[in-house]
Image (cartoon, rainbow, N blue to C red):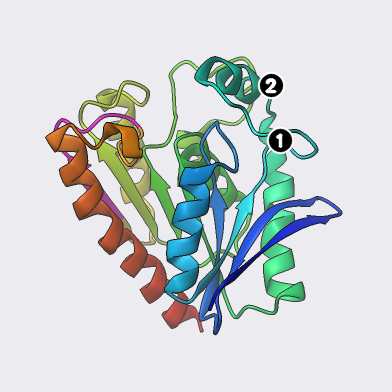
Amino acid sequence: MTSTEQIDHGRVHGLIAHADKPRGGIILLPTIFGIDRFSQGRAAMLAEAGLTTLIWNPYPGEAAPTGHDEAMSRAGKLSDDAVGDMSECVGYMLSTLRLPSVAVLGFCLGGRYALLLAAHDPRLVCCVSYYPSIREPLKPNETRDAIALSAEIPCPVHVVYGTADQVILKPTFLKLRETLERRKAATVAQVHPDAVHSFLRPDLQSVPANAAATRLSWPPAVRFIETSLQRAG
């Protein structure tokens, strides 16, 4: 049996999906919608697989956005300095929850943050970045260059991309991939033809390319995390 718990402890804000007998932990960095049904569903899947998952809350003390325009507005006010709060979440999972090792997994907004966090916090054993929202030039509230900082990530990275992504365009993705592949740590890149940004969303599954990308991308991404956590343990 798994269980969930709201956490508001110092700089650690979010929702924890506890695995019954955890084999490791995951910091899940969500989309612009914060802790929503999608992120909770993925956290539940991971907890059922034995991976205690903490969904970081980008909007502590506030209700999650209800519409796309509101979510975009709220996300546009976030600071890249929030990476420090995410790092506190890593520490909480290692010290308070006493998990043997921790990985990071992010989607969209969280996919970009996952790369920033992996560059910032060497305690992470791996990083999975789903269709990271990396734009060129940077948005006004973005002060850290995710591509440049990706060169400093010490752990293995698994990045997932759809060729019809409307946010991280192909030249930007190729630049990210080339930067990651120049590191000493392993890089795994999944490329899914014709899949759009945020292709995992349930409302996008009627498009065959998105459904295929969803079906094919998730199992190897989870296995990448599981293998990284096992080796670290």
**Which region is colored magenta?**
188-197
Q: Amino acid at mark 2?
A: Lys
Marks 1 and 2 close (CB-CB < 8 Å): no
Q: Is residue 26 left or right of residue 90?
A: left
Image quadrant in which you'd find residue 227: bottom left
Residue 129: percent from left, percent from top: 41, 47
Q: Is residue 64 left or right of residue 145?
A: right
Residue corresponding to mark 1: 59
Residue 118: percent from left, percent from top: 54, 53
144 over 100 or under it: above or below: above
Q: Secondary structure at mark 1?
A: loop
| Front: mark 1 or 2 | 1
Query: What is the number of the mark on residue 167?
Result: none
Can residue 155 be seen?
Answer: no
Camera-side residue of 15 and 221: 15
Residue corresponding to mark 2: 77
Q: Amino acid at mark 1?
A: Tyr
Q: Which residue is rendered at x = 54% and y = 85% of the image?
A: 21
Estimate how packed mark 1 is, as few (under 14), some (14 to 19) or many (20 or more) residues with alpha carbons within 10 Å: some
226 over 115 or under it: above or below: below
Q: Secondary structure at mark 2?
A: loop
How far apart marks 1 and 2 lie (CA) works out to 10 Å
